[in-house]
Image: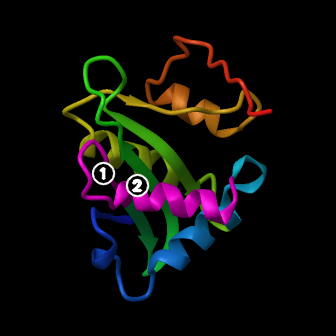
Amino acid sequence: MISIEKYGKEDQLPGDFQREQVIDFLYNHLDQFGDTKSAIGKCLDYAFSDAEGKGGFVLIGRKEEKPVGVVIVNDTGMSEYIPDYFLVYIAVDGTERNQGIGQQLMERTFDECKDGDLALHVEYDNPAKRLYERTGFTNKYAEMRRARS
């Protein structure tokens, strides 16, 4: 069992795990499915924003005071036609995997998003896809993107 705390503003982050530590944790533990530190920072900025139509939260899971998992959820501001929440990042420390930490983080995320729909993107070959399916996510749509030229 881990303890999980929610943070809705950057100044609420614990003294030993500030913005740069959150970014570094995700960057280091998302493995090949991660993004740049810059992209993670932009997601964090969005989650902590007070601007209309933005916001979200960060969950930090700890085991014996050591951070072992991080979640960032963004509020889409598009209720009724796009899911209310988007789970952008979830990562578990590589040395702590297969102990149910990801499951606990997902359950807490569901509790925090109980007043709206939650979506996420996952690559087909990402092992976490099994966790998402076990926790009730379904593949309803195919995502299509057009990259900038």
Label 1 SS = loop
Whether residues under marks 1 and 2 lie with C-beta atoms below 8 angstroms apart, the answer is: yes
Q: Position of residue 32 (x, y in %)?
A: 78, 50
**Type of amino acid under label 2:** Tyr
Q: Residue at x 27, y 39 (%)?
A: 113
Secondary structure under tag 2 reads helix
Q: Residue at x 25, y 30 (%)?
A: 116
Query: Which quadrant is home to the N terminus?
Result: bottom left
> In the orientation shown, which residue stands out farthest toward the bottom?
15
The magenta stretch spans residue 47: yes
Q: Which residue is mark 1?
A: 55
Give 149 or 122, whichever is nearer the viewer. Answer: 149
Q: Is residue 55 left or right of residue 31?
A: left
Residue 1 included in the magenta stretch of the image: no
Where's residue 24, x and y in %? Answer: 62, 72
Mark 1 vs 2, N-terminal side: 2
Where's residue 57, x and y in %? 33, 56
The number of callouts visible is 2
Q: Which residue is mark 2?
A: 46
- Answer above or below: position of 108 versus 77: below
Percent x, y of residue 17? 45, 81
Q: Is residue 45 left or right of residue 6?
A: right
Neighbourhood count class around disc 2 (C-alpha, 10 Å): few under 14, some 14–19, many 20 upward: many
**Residue 44 location, quadrant:** bottom left
- Between residues 79 and 57, which one lies in front from this camera angle? 79
**Stretch of the chain drawn in magenta:** 35-58
Residue type, mark 1 in image: Gly
On the picture, is 55 further left or further right than 25?
left
